[in-house]
Image: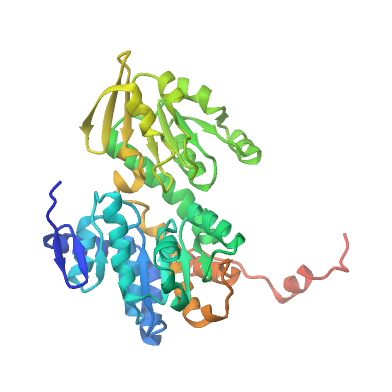
């Protein structure tokens, strides 16, 4: 990949010449995100975010561009970076930069460049932060603590990020309130399940072009993301095996018709492996040693630590890139193991991320949380806060209306009955 970039006042992207292509992608996403477009129309008139400076660190995709431009339309000043080295879509980043967004993001950046981009976005001295994985929030607290004094609040998009921020808050180390967007029902029951499931399988198929029907498909972690992958793999004819540490999650997998076993056993029979746990060292050296010839391994968790590639490097005799986002590791006994997207998010590095239709609800939650923080953030304590139930239901209601779905309403008598504790059988 070229090491040349397009740079200017407030941006650094791969190639500004890709802006037209990126703009067409954004236009397509807008046509599939009616909730966001509804909010853009409403809050452009209200200018609900006027005076706010929002620093964002989130995957630069066409859907994220719709969020960014909606925040800006509502009056906010924006500075943005990508939250994963391989997830930025360079044409979308170019389109945003060409339209005047301050953005520092390109596909294939290294770790030093990743944090340089975050630091550049923080130069605006934000009043709000918007995060996916909490690297931005951690950067504020660890490297730029002086900025925390003027930050009203932030949001967090992912399971892993929310988990770490709750631990941070429990230790008394979190310095401003953060809204857990990930924990909204209209996020985790749709984005995490249906979005991750479809986009992860899309990434696997783009990187390998293999037939999934008839294969043993091993899903590590049967949470919302893992269960979504299992659902889609099962629908394509694969035989799903789940690995878990949580008894209730393992039981759900079993009652959904999947086999549940330890990774040590699954490693011997799996054809395709996908990790979705948020934990490190899910697949390690001893698992690679027993895998079949031709096994495919990938990750859909936020960080790239779930698959221990150092262990695999130590076992392999050689490595080559055999397809885009597909590296072949040749073992001493002649077996070949294929790792997709360098162990990073297969759905974003090898595909385009979640479909626009599900991100419509997740990013509606992000947008409305920014609006809430702009008006109420000063009254919230430094903790991780949930999205109000009413917001969840409002977003779901708007989405249902765009799908021409009918919704019943309780009568006054039913409402009264619902809270009548004197009613018997």
Asked if residue 89 lies left or right of residue 293, the reply is left
Q: Is residue 124 above or below residue 305?
A: below
Can residue 87 be seen? no
Q: Is residue 132 above or below residue 415?
A: above
Location of residue 14 by image quarter: bottom left
Asked if residue 11 lies left or right of residue 299, the reply is left
Q: Is residue 389 above or below residue 325?
A: below
Q: Nearer the viewer, residue 150 or 297?
A: 150
Q: Is residue 146 above or below residue 295?
A: below
Residue 166 x/y as whole percent = 57, 59
In the picture, the quarter occupied by the C terminus is: bottom right
Asked if residue 73 lies left or right of residue 214, the reply is left
Location of residue 414 by image quarter: bottom right
Q: Nearer the viewer, residue 37 or 309?
A: 309
Colouring of the image: rainbow
Residue 39 x/y as whole percent = 41, 75
Q: Nearer the viewer, residue 100 or 126?
A: 126
Q: Going by the picture, which residue comes out furthest to the top?
A: 333
Residue 5 x/y as whole percent = 14, 58
Q: Residue at x 32, y 75 (%)?
A: 124
Count up the numbered dots. 0
Can residue 82 be seen? yes
Residue 89 x/y as whole percent = 25, 55
Q: Residue at x 88, y 69 (%)?
A: 422
Q: Residue at x 46, y 20 (%)?
A: 268
Q: Going by the picture, which residue comes out furthest to the bottom?
A: 46
Asked if residue 96 lies left or right of residue 161, the reply is left
């Amino acid at each position: 990949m070229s090491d040349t970039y397009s740079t200017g006042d407030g941006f650094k992207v791969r190639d500004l010449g890709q802006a037209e292509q990126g703009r067409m992608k954004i236009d397509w996403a807008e046509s599939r995100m009616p909730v966001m477009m509804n909010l853009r129309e409403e809050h452009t008139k209200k200018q609900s975010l006027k005076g706010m400076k929002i620093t964002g660190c989130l995957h630069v995709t066409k859907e994220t561009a719709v969020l960014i431009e909606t925040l800006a339309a509502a009056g906010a000043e924006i500075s943005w970076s990508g939250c994963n080295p391989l997830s930025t879509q360079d044409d979308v980043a170019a389109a945003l930069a060409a339209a005047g967004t301050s953005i520092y993001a390109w596909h294939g950046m290294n770790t030093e460049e990743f944090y340089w981009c975050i630091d550049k976005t923080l130069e605006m001295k934000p009043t709000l932060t918007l995060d996916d994985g909490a690297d931005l929030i951690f950067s504020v607290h660890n490297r730029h603590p002086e900025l925390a004094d003027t930050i009203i609040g932030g949001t967090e998009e992912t399971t892993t990020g929310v988990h770490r921020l709750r631990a941070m808050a429990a230790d008394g180390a979190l310095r401003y309130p953060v809204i857990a967007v990930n924990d909204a029902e209209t996020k985790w029951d749709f984005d995490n399940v249906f979005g991750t499931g479809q986009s992860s399988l899309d990434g696997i198929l783009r990187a390998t072009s293999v037939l999934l029907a008839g294969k043993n498909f091993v899903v590590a972690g049967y949470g919302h993301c893992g269960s979504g992958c299992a659902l889609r793999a099962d629908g394509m004819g694969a035989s799903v095996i789940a690995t878990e540490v949580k008894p209730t999650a393992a039981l759900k997998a079993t009652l959904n018709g999947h086999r549940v076993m330890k990774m040590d056993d699954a490693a011997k029979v799996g054809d395709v492996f996908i990790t979705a746990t948020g934990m490190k060292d899910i697949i390690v050296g001893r698992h690679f040693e027993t895998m079949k010839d031709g096994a495919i391994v990938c990750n859909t968790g936020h960080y790239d630590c779930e698959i221990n590639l150092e262990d695999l490097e130590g076992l392999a005799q050689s490595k080559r890139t055999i397809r885009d986002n597909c590296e072949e590791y040749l073992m001493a006994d002649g077996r070949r193991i294929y790792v997709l997207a360098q162990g990073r998010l297969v759905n974003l590095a090898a595909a385009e991320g979640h479909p626009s239709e599900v991100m419509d609800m997740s990013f509606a939650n992000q947008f409305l949380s920014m609006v809430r923080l702009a008006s109420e953030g000063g009254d919230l304590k430094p903790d991780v806060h949930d999205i109000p139930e009413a917001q969840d239901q409002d977003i779901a209601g708007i989405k249902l209306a765009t799908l021409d779905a009918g919704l019943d309403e309780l009568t006054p008598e039913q409402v009264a009955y619902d809270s009548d504790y004197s009613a018997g059988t």
